[in-house]
Image: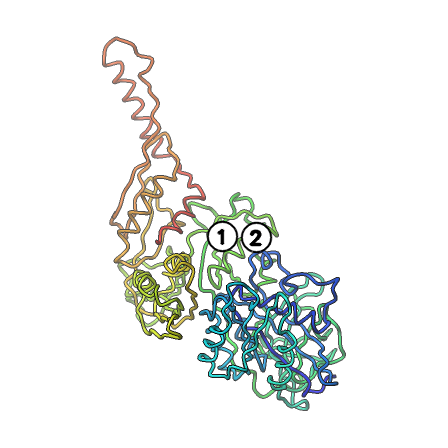
C-alpha cells in the first residue's frame, strides 16, 4: 500500500476544446501508464460521441506511477466533464482532489466555464497549477493569457507553466509541479472507513462499478460496506485501483482512489456524492455536499411506431444503468399515443440521450418541445406547490393562484466590443443585469439573472452569433420566482394537441401563438377538408390560420346544360367535406414538433 505522503490526487479544469483530454494523454504517455501500442487520441474518452464531439461526457479516473528524485509517487487523475450540464459530477470529482491543473488555451484565454469550475475548486481549497496550453499554435498569445491568469488567480508570473499537449512541451514541468505543489492527502488510516463516491459505471457482466476516494480508514476485499444516503449494505466482492484496466488489490488505503464491485444491478442505488462506510463500524458523519441530482429540462419521448412502446421502455431502462441522472415516467398524448416524460440535466444531456437511443439501440423517437419544471399554487392551497413537468398538468386558470419558474445566474464572458449585442440578447430573454466586470481591458464578465426557460432552446447559438463566437456562457440555478405565465394550447380541427402546448410569459403569448400557427400551416400537409389551426389561452382564441382543402373539380364532367346540375354536384361535395371534417384525423409530421423548438427566437 502506498505511503500517504507519496499520493497526489488532482483533476484538470478546462473549457471545452482547450486541450484537456490531449493533456491527459500526454501525462499517461510520459509516466509510462500507457504503451505506444495502446495509445490513441482522447484515450480516456471511450464513448464514440465523446470522441466525435471532442467533449468529455462521463468523468474518468486513472492512476499513474511517477518516479521523481528517486521516490515513487502515485498520481490519481480524476478527469471531469467540462460542460455546464454535468456541473454536479464536476463538483464531486473536485471534492475528491487536493489540486487541479487549470488549462487555458493560449489563443482563446479564459472562458466562463473555466472560471465557474475554478471557483468550485477554490471553494474546496484546491492547489491550482495554471497551464497555458497550445503555445505552439500560430495564433497563440501566451504572454497576454499569462497576464490574464496572474490577474485572476493572484499568483506569480513564474507559477504559470507554458505547454503544448500536442507536442509534449512542458509535460515534465507539469508533473514536477504536481509532486511539488499539490499537498498529499490528509486522513486517519485507523479511523472508521469514510469514502466519497465520485462516479459509477455500468458493467453488463458484473453490475455497477463504483469509483471512490478514501478520506479515512481503508476498504478491504470482502468487507461489509454501507452507502449512507441510500442506507443499503453490500459486500465488497472486489476492490482495486484504476489503471488503464482495473487492477484488483486486497485493500485501498487512506487518500487513495479506487473502484468497488459488489454486484449492484440498479444505477439508482449508487448516488454520486454518497459516502461509503463500514457497516459494522460506521463513520460518525458522512462527507458533506451530497445532493440529489435534479433534472432541469423535461421533454416527451414517443416511439415513431406506437407498437415500439415496450421496446422504448426497455431501452430507457438500459440507458439509465449507465446514466443515473436520466429520469422518466410513462405518459400518454392524444396526438402521439403512449410514451414517456423524461428529465434531463440540460439541453446537451437531452441531445446525447437522443443520439445514444438512435445509435446504440436503433430507436427512432419523437421528442416534444422541451420545458423546465414549474411550480403552480392553487387558490385552495396557496402554500403547497404542485410540480409541473408538462404544460398539460397546469391547473385550470379559475383555480390557479400563481406560477413560479426556475431562475438562473448566468455568467457571460465576451470581448468588450460585443457587450451591447450580448446585453440586448439577454434583455430580450427577460434577463436582468446584475454585474459587469472588466477582467482585462479587452474582456468583460457580465452576470444576469434570467429564467431558465429562456435559455433552454437556442440561447447559446444566438449568443455565439451576436458575439461572432467570442462569448462563453455558464450558469447555475438560484431558485424559483413568481412569473406571469400562461399556457398556449394549439388546436387542430378543433382538437387540442397536448404535445404542442407550451407555457410562455404573458407578454410574448400572442406573438408566439401567432408564429406557431403560421409555422404549422406551412408544415401540415393539405387534406380533403379545411383544417383550422388555432392558438388559445384557456377558451380564448388568440391566433388562427387555415390549411386549405385539396379540392377536386367535380364539375369537370359537366359541359353545357343547366347551372342547377353544377350546383347539385357542388352541394353534394360540400356535404361530404363537412362529414369528412367531423371524422377526419390530422397527422402531424415530426418536422412540426422540431419547428416549434426553433420558434423561441
Q: How many marks?
A: 2
Q: Residue furthest top?
A: 561
- Horizontally, residue 18 falls left or right of residue 217, namely left
**Looking at the image, which residue is at 54% across and 75% down?**
102
Most foreground residue, 560 or 386:
560
Q: Which residue is mark 2?
A: 357
Q: Nearer the viewer, residue 374 or 598?
A: 598
Report the disc number at residue 301. 1
Foreground of the two, 96 or 494:
96
> Could you tell whether 105 is left or right of 175 in the image?
left
Q: Position of residue 377 (x, y in %)?
A: 32, 66
Spatial separation of the CA atoms under disc 1 and disc 2: 11 Å
User: Where's residue 369, x and y in %?
Assistant: 41, 53
Q: Is residue 207 above or below residue 255?
A: above
For the N terminus, which image quadrant? Answer: bottom right
Out of 102 and 504, give the one closest to the viewer. Answer: 102
Does residue 109 appear to the left or right of 414 in the view shown? right
Amino acid at each position: 500500500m502506498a505511503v500517504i505522503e507519496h499520493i497526489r490526487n488532482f483533476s484538470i479544469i478546462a473549457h471545452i476544446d482547450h486541450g484537456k483530454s490531449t493533456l491527459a494523454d500526454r501525462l499517461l504517455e510520459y509516466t509510462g501508464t500507457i504503451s505506444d501500442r495502446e495509445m490513441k487520441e482522447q484515450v480516456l474518452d471511450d464513448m464514440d460521441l465523446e470522441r466525435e464531439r471532442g467533449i468529455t461526457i462521463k468523468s474518468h479516473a486513472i492512476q499513474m506511477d511517477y518516479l521523481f528524485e528517486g521516490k515513487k509517487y502515485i498520481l490519481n487523475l480524476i478527469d471531469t466533464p467540462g460542460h455546464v450540464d454535468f456541473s454536479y459530477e464536476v463538483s464531486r470529482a473536485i471534492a475528491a482532489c487536493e489540486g487541479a491543473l487549470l488549462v487555458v488555451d493560449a489563443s482563446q484565454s479564459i472562458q466562463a466555464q473555466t472560471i465557474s469550475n475554478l471557483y468550485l475548486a477554490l471553494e474546496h481549497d484546491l492547489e491550482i497549477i495554471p497551464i497555458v496550453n497550445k503555445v505552439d499554435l500560430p495564433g497563440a498569445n501566451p504572454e497576454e493569457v499569462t497576464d490574464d491568469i496572474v490577474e485572476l488567480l493572484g499568483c506569480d508570473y513564474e507559477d504559470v507553466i507554458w505547454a503544448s499537449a500536442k507536442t509534449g512541451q512542458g509535460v515534465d514541468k507539469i508533473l514536477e509541479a504536481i509532486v511539488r505543489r499539490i499537498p498529499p492527502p490528509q486522513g486517519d488510516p485507523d479511523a472508521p472507513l469514510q469514502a466519497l463516491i465520485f462516479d459509477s459505471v455500468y458493467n453488463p457482466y458484473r453490475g455497477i462499478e463504483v469509483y471512490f476516494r478514501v478520506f479515512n480508514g481503508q476498504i478491504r476485499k470482502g468487507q461489509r460496506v454501507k452507502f449512507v444516503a441510500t442506507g443499503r449494505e453490500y459486500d465488497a466482492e472486489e476492490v482495486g485501483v484504476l489503471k488503464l484496466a482495473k487492477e484488483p488489490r486486497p485493500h485501498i488505503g487512506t487518500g487513495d482512489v479506487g473502484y468497488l464491485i459488489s454486484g449492484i444491478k440498479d444505477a439508482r442505488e449508487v448516488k454520486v456524492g454518497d459516502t461509503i462506510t463500514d457497516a459494522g463500524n460506521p463513520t460518525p458523519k458522512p462527507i458533506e455536499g451530497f445532493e440529489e441530482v435534479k433534472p432541469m429540462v423535461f421533454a416527451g419521448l414517443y416511439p415513431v411506431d406506437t407498437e415500439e412502446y415496450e421496446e422504448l421502455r426497455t431501452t430507457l431502462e438500459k440507458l439509465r444503468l449507465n446514466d443515473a441522472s436520466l429520469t422518466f415516467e410513462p405518459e400518454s398524448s392524444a396526438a402521439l399515443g403512449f410514451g414517456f416524460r423524461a428529465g434531463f440535466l440540460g439541453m446537451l444531456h437531452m441531445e446525447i440521450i437522443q443520439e445514444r437511443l438512435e445509435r446504440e439501440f436503433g430507436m427512432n423517437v419523437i421528442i416534444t418541445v422541451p420545458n423546465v419544471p414549474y411550480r403552480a399554487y392553487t387558490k385552495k392551497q396557496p402554500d403547497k406547490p404542485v410540480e409541473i413537468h408538462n404544460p398539460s398538468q397546469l391547473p385550470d386558470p379559475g383555480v390557479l393562484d400563481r406560477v413560479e419558474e426556475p431562475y438562473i445566474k448566468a455568467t457571460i464572458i465576451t470581448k468588450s466590443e460585443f457587450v451591447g449585442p450580448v446585453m440586448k440578447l439577454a434583455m430580450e430573454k427577460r434577463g436582468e443585469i446584475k454585474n459587469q466586470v472588466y477582467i482585462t481591458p479587452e474582456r468583460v464578465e457580465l452576470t444576469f439573472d434570467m429564467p431558465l426557460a429562456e435559455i433552454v432552446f437556442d440561447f447559446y447559438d444566438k449568443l455565439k452569433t451576436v458575439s461572432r463566437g467570442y462569448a462563453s456562457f455558464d450558469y447555475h440555478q438560484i431558485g424559483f420566482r413568481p412569473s406571469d405565465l400562461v399556457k398556449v394550447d394549439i388546436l387542430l380541427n378543433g382538437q387540442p394537441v397536448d404535445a404542442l402546448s407550451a407555457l410562455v410569459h404573458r407578454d410574448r403569448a400572442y406573438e408566439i401563438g401567432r408564429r406557431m400557427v403560421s409555422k404549422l400551416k406551412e408544415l401540415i400537409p393539405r387534406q380533403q377538408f379545411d383544417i383550422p389551426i388555432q392558438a388559445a389561452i384557456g377558451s380564448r382564441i388568440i391566433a388562427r390560420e387555415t390549411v386549405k382543402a385539396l379540392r377536386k373539380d367535380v364539375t369537370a364532367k359537366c359541359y353545357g346544360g343547366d347551372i342547377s346540375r353544377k350546383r347539385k354536384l357542388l352541394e353534394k361535395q360540400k356535404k361530404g367535406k363537412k362529414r369528412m371534417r367531423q371524422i377526419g384525423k390530422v397527422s402531424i409530421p415530426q418536422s412540426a414538433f422540431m419547428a416549434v423548438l426553433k420558434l423561441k427566437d
